[in-house]
Image: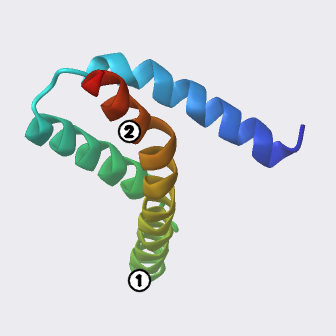
């Protein structure tokens, strides 16, 4: 297993543990919680003594994060959401 595969597996396991906490919560509450978590994650990236580089780093990380989310949406829609909709429609 590559290091990337290991990280992906660990991330998926962590996300699965979070699902029950978020499930059933109002969409706005879920969104606000996720926003806070991402903001805390980005705020933790600091280049000591260089606020400008810190700001640039955080902006870059946020841009990559958004790209990753956008890339994952169609995968989850096809593999998780649409099958769940079909299952509920039966």
Out of 59 and 75, give the one closest to the viewer.
75
Q: Nearer the viewer, residue 62 or 1?
A: 1
Is 68 placed above or below 28 here?
A: below
Q: Earlier in the sequence, mark 2 or mark 1?
A: 1
Name the residue: 31% across, 53% down: 39
Percent of width and height locating residue 71? 51, 62
- x and y percentages locating residue 24 in the rendered image: 18, 21
Q: Quadrant of residue 83?
A: top left
Query: Label 1, on which residue?
Result: 52
Q: Quadrant of residue 56?
A: bottom left
Q: Which mark is residue 81?
A: 2
User: Label 2 vs label 1: CA separation?
Assistant: 40 Å
> Which mark is drawn over residue 15?
none
Query: Of helix, strand and loop, which one carries label 2?
Result: helix
Residue occupying the point 33% across, 16% down: 20
Give left or right: position of 70 versus 75: left
Q: Position of residue 34 (x, y in %)?
A: 28, 43
Q: Give neighbour class at mark 1: few <14, some 14-19, many 20+ (Cα, 10 Å).
A: few
Which quadrant of the rendered structure holds the C terminus?
top left
Q: Nearer the viewer, residue 40 or 51?
A: 40
Which residue is the extreme one toward the right? 1
**54, above or below 72, in the image:** below
Q: Residue at x 69, y 33 (%)?
A: 9
Indicate the position of residue 43 as horizontal and vertical percent values.
Answer: 37, 56
- Give SS at disc 1: helix
Query: Which residue sits at x=53%, y=27%?
Result: 14
Residue farthest to the front, as pictured: 90
- Quadrant containing the N terminus in the rendered view: top right
| Residue 49 vertical position relative to residue 80 in the rendered view, above or below | below
């Amino acid at each position: 297993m590559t290091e990337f595969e290991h990280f992906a597996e660990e991330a998926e396991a962590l996300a699965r543990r979070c699902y029950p906490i978020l499930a059933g919560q109002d969409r706005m509450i879920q969104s606000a919680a996720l926003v806070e978590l991402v903001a805390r994650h980005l705020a933790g990236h600091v280049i000591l003594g260089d606020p400008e580089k810190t700001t640039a780093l955080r902006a870059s990380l946020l841009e990559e994060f958004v790209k990753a989310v956008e890339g994952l949406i169609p995968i989850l829609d096809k593999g998780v959401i649409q099958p769940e909709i079909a299952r509920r429609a039966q």
